[in-house]
Amino acid sequence: MTELAPIPDFNVYPVRATIERAESWDTGAQVFWSDGHVSRYHGLWLRDNCPCAECVNPETLEQVFDISTVPDDLAAASVAVDDAGSLTVAWPDGHTSRHHPGWLRAHCYSAPPVVEGMVQSWGSDFVVPEFDGRDVLDNDDALLAWLEALHAHGLALLRNCPLDDGSVEWFADRISFLRQTNFGRVFDVMTKADPDSSAYLSIELPLHVDLPTRELQPGLQFLLCHVNNASGGDSIMADGFRIAETLRDEEPHHFKVLSTLPMEFRNRAKTSDYRQRVPAIRLNDDGSIHEIRVGNFLRGPQHVDEADMPRLYAAYRRFIAMTREDRFRVTFRLDSGIMATFDNRRVLHARTAFDPASGDRRLQGCYIDTDELNSRLRILRRMAARAHASA
Amino acid sequence: MTELAPIPDFNVYPVRATIERAESWDTGAQVFWSDGHVSRYHGLWLRDNCPCAECVNPETLEQVFDISTVPDDLAAASVAVDDAGSLTVAWPDGHTSRHHPGWLRAHCYSAPPVVEGMVQSWGSDFVVPEFDGRDVLDNDDALLAWLEALHAHGLALLRNCPLDDGSVEWFADRISFLRQTNFGRVFDVMTKADPDSSAYLSIELPLHVDLPTRELQPGLQFLLCHVNNASGGDSIMADGFRIAETLRDEEPHHFKVLSTLPMEFRNRAKTSDYRQRVPAIRLNDDGSIHEIRVGNFLRGPQHVDEADMPRLYAAYRRFIAMTREDRFRVTFRLDSGIMATFDNRRVLHARTAFDPASGDRRLQGCYIDTDELNSRLRILRRMAARAHASA
């Protein structure tokens, strides 16, 4: 069922439909599948993806064949289906390529690419998913469940987390290495002398993302509560995707402005000077929301054309006003042993002011990048698929 | 000349022109400068950027005032110039804002934003800038000269580098913290058993960037040669910006394809599965080249509409063929103690095959992100400007 040997890839490609017939088409092949689907592949594509040990290094599984070296008019000499059910393509120079049917169908481009996992935005009625921290540390199934929740919703809580110094990193390590920043690898969120961030004061922090001043904002943020017995210091979160989608529905002119006009983001510090000039709302090619970039205390002086400045302020002020509306906000309290993990490019976070004289409030935090979450999710799903295929 | 106190910023804003006159304009102010320039500032912009200790936290210099809290029709009650030459704005609620003339002119938006530093692409006649490695480690002026060269050209060599194990990181540390990857913090480029990258074989590596599979490709790559006495293993580099610009001039239809159609990038490994779907050439808003993404051995199966596939292959094959043209390539040999540093999102690097039986070849490498280079450059320039202003 799951043949791995001829595929230069560690993934699993189950054969969900077999090749009934293949014929020459254009420079390549047309493939008729047992489920009625028809796929068409160009000669250059088929040659480029030849999985043989001459074209792909067998140790690294990386391609060594260079598609720019074949003639412009390269075309298959003949195409057929072999006894194992693979597509075979004979080339004019004598080379032969064999494409496994599971792999070939998974990469059919006569249909649009499959989107990995769906993301659904949430509002104030969102029930934040919760998992057990020690399970996540010990068990890959629990890890996968937590990561799927983070991928889908951008926010989850872990209870029962160990509180050793730096233990927040144990959770990040379950996914991948940390993303270091100018605040270090693991940072302590508490009041500090000579603070270089509003986070290190006791004032209210409005809804924001961390490090909007970076070209790539950190993907996941981890905040593990060690102590929180001061009065105040509650957590507020909102799905920036939901706010942006609502803005698009209700006031599309503001949405247009925030997704096209650049805003200025700057940090102010003695030893670093990060700057970005980029729209607050970034879209994917299909128009869905890619990421949000807001943070009142990390903005620089705005610089757009004079005629655009009033539109920019009107749209930005509306967005910030929406972050204060109840319909978007969930509120909870991080008590000792609870960790919040959230998609820092999507979910805005805030805390209410606290009174440092009334008690202690101390969190430890760290970041990893979105690529690392996605890669780890693919590996865990791959392991699950492999286990399923061999069962 | 350089007044720092009233500006919530660590930068230096010399007064190159004074305010001759200010008058009410729209909701804000119109400012007439001693050099004849006229700037116009809206009320919301002036209020948003109020630098007073009530609007900006004096410890972090981060903004606490929230511009979304003022009325839609906010307008200055009056504007004037004070004895120190600052613009003063009185607001209807009694608040007053004072804007320092150096800061105000530097942020004038009646003119386009200033581009930081010019980038000029190069071809085969490029003389690679060289500096002394120990100077760069010891001396901030030498550091600044090296970084300015890297910023402008995307490639520089350091000679006379110490060869302690891990010393490549000392150079990265002169800029900022490392960018860790799945290959570790500092990686050894040498032949390895069970290699997870073509870099760890002795085969030729074609011109490529590292980690095109990541959303944010590492910005600077450092490669410090410890030993290179095998036959072969020469270094080849090319400015990807120059190749892309030339393609735009010579075959604009191919350029259009590579800057708009997404390509698939994948790694193939047991413990990671990174994927990106993004054009090979990414542009800035003004049409200049932002970054290049090519690497034959890190591509996945391409997935664009069937009708676009021949155009994608034609354009990609042309670009790769151009990387082999002499007009774009510089060649050198990394000998022991020489370090190449280059903009990994711009400068393509390659090595010729080497014979591991003929001798040893071992480099140590690491990465940092573009944000870190830019921030460090701004800080070094700020220090130089401050020294100049106080001299």
Image: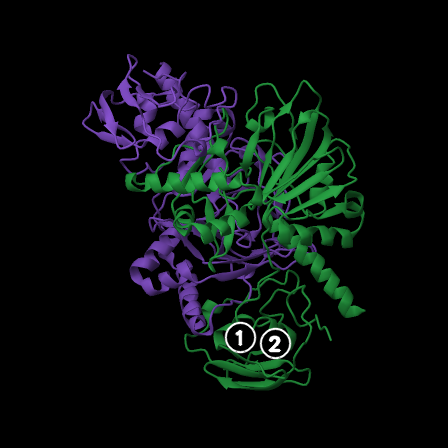
Chain colours: A green, B purple
Q: Residues within 10 Å of mark 1 (few under 14, many from 20)?
A: many
Q: Give whichever of A127, A114 is nearer the camera.
A: A127
Residue A125 in picture, x, y percent from top left: 64, 48
Q: Quadrant of the C terminus of chain B?
A: top left
Q: Secondary structure at mark 2?
A: strand
Left or right, B82 with reference to B260: left
Residue B156 visible, this angle: yes
What residue is at 70 percent from the left and 24 percent from the top? A230
Q: Is B193 above or below relative to B53?
A: below
Left or right? Give the position of B187 relative to B152. Answer: right
Report the chain holding disc 2. A
Q: Residues within 10 Å of mark 2 (few under 14, many from 20)?
A: many
**A231 or A364: nearer the eye?**
A231
Residue A46 is marked as 1
Q: Which mark is residue A99?
A: 2
Q: Is residue B129 shown to the viewer in this render?
A: no
Q: Residue extending furthest top?
A: B83
Q: Are marks 1 and 2 in contact (CB under 8 Å)?
A: yes
A300 w.r.t. A238: above or below = above
**Count of labels in the image:** 2
Residue at 52% in and 40% down: A323
Q: Earlier in the sequence, mark 1 or mark 2?
A: 1
User: Type of residue at label 1?
Assistant: Leu
Q: Chain of mark 1?
A: A
Outermost residue toward the left in this view: B36
Residue B369 spot, x, y in % from top left: 52, 41
Q: In which quadrant is the N terminus of chain B drawn?
A: top left
- Badge 2 amino acid: His
